[in-house]
Amino acid sequence: MLLEILKPGKRQDRWKRPRRFDRNLIVIGGGSAGLVSAYIAAATKAKVTLVEAHKMGGDCLNTGCVPSKALIRSARLAHQMRHADQYGLTPHQPQVPFADVIARVHRVIAEIEPHDSIERYTSLGVEVLQGYARLVDPWTVEIALNNGVTQRLTTRSVIIATGAQPFVPPLPGIEDVGYLTSDTLWEHMKARAEAPRRLIVLGGGPIGCELAQSFARLGSAVTQIEMAPRIMIREDEDASELVRNALEANGVRVLTNHKARACGVTDGRKWIEVEQAGEMRRIEFDDLIVAVGRAPRLKGFGLEEIGINVDRVVETNAYLQTTHPHILAAGDVAGPYQFTHVASHQAWFATVNALFGDLKRFKADYRVIPWATFTDPEVARVGLSEAEAKENNVSYEVTRYGLDDLDRAITDGSTRGFVKVLTVPGKDRILGVTIVGEHAGDLIAEFVLAMKQGLGLNKILGTIHIYPTLTEANKMAAGLWRRNHISPRLLALVERFHSWRRG
């Protein structure tokens, strides 16, 4: 511990540490991690300044989670109208006034916007400055305000919460075809009267799959290109296969094992060239969405200049501290996960350690991290997948319950999917859960709680679940595990007992 204290002091010798500070905490970035950090600091009566150059709410509100889920909802309704005969109704081919769909997306953003607004955070006691922040030394932040004024503030601690941005691969010709990303898509589509006629989605991860399915349901001819052997490579094969089948049933042409090589425009027609098994071909398109991942925002904040290690992310220790312990990082810029809920989770640890770390520090806890992809069917996971268990030589048992057996799923016509639970061999302790199906992102919460609190499948089995609901699938999976672990000797003994009782 003494060595840790002395090391930063030596690194900081070339700067003069202020005797007094203007702020207890400056937070750089107004996304999920930054907002939560500022909120906690203000709630504990610290003097805190939040600096955001663009829009409050960050990517999740403005270009990510919120707009994509609004689009998914409209696309799903259009799909249900086409297939109303599955519910005993007359199917109907919906008219899709695309401009109205996108207008609704922006209305949803506007409705949620006050939750993250400057006015709200100011009322909570946070000073919000709109501009670009740069560390000029370990305790001084220079802010180039959007109104042209430059301001310098000294601070006891700093939290870097600058988020991430879409990664655009260096494909030859990609700048010539006018590509879109999740950051630029929503503003670009405002001016469109119709959905893209021929759409390429480059990338088979969660963002790519959600957008590919939604645009296909809204009338676009969608081709999805993924260089890996399958889409949603982080999930187990049975989960990604179900999603692929759903995408293809919705009209998406899914090209796995295809590597994008170049883009271009010939005689006014846009194309992308892909390679599969050594063969090249060109696919023409009208719009291209690049969804191959996101890269942390690391440049322009003065981090490297003051000796903070930056590679793929801002390098931090288990307490989210950088090489300067009073400068911490949280959210996408810190890794290892790029989820809004993880950013909020990290923000608590970063803020408490920033403000009270001299008294007590807390290690960021990544033991139980859930996530979901909001395709139809949804895919949600927490803990180990089968593939990860095999890769890490973790012994496990699998219990798999199919939703086609669940009463509520049958009544709703949503029987695609399953609940798959990995447990310690012979025990009910949960190692990981994958759920594919309707509202999987909601259903996973019970298993997240169970894993966090050390509860096993027997506890879930012993909990009353309302009938008929989808949450019964969790209890059914637990019951299936229990039936598979009843002792044959005990059953034989009980059978003899009943025989004796009959006389």
Image: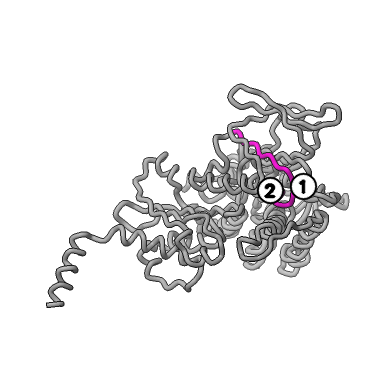
Q: Residue at x 74, y 26 (%)?
A: 172
Magenta residues, start to end? 213-227
**Element type at mark 1:** helix
Q: Is residue 225 magenta?
A: yes
Colour convention of the picture: one colour
Residue that lies at the very extreme toward the right in this rendered image: 148
Q: Residue at x 45, y 71 (%)?
A: 465
Residue 275 shows up from this direction: yes
Dot 2 and dot 1 residues touching (CB under 8 Å) = yes
- Could you say which is closer to the camera, residue 441 or residue 110? 441
> Which three-letter amino acid code belongs to the residue tagged 2?
Leu
Q: Residue at x 56, y 43 (%)?
A: 232
> Which three-letter amino acid code belongs to the residue tagged 1?
Leu
Q: Which residue is mark 2?
A: 211
In the image: residue 242, left or right of residue 465 = right
Q: Assign the C terminus to one quadrant of the image.
A: bottom left
**Dot 2 or dot 1, earlier in sequence:** 1
- Could you say which is closer to the camera, residue 74 or residue 323? 74
Q: Which residue is mark 1?
A: 185
Q: Position of residue 323 (x, y in %)?
A: 58, 43
Badge 2 crowding class, 10 Å Cα cut-off, few under 14, some 14 to 19, many 20 or more, is many
Residue that lies at the very extreme toward the top in this rendered image: 278
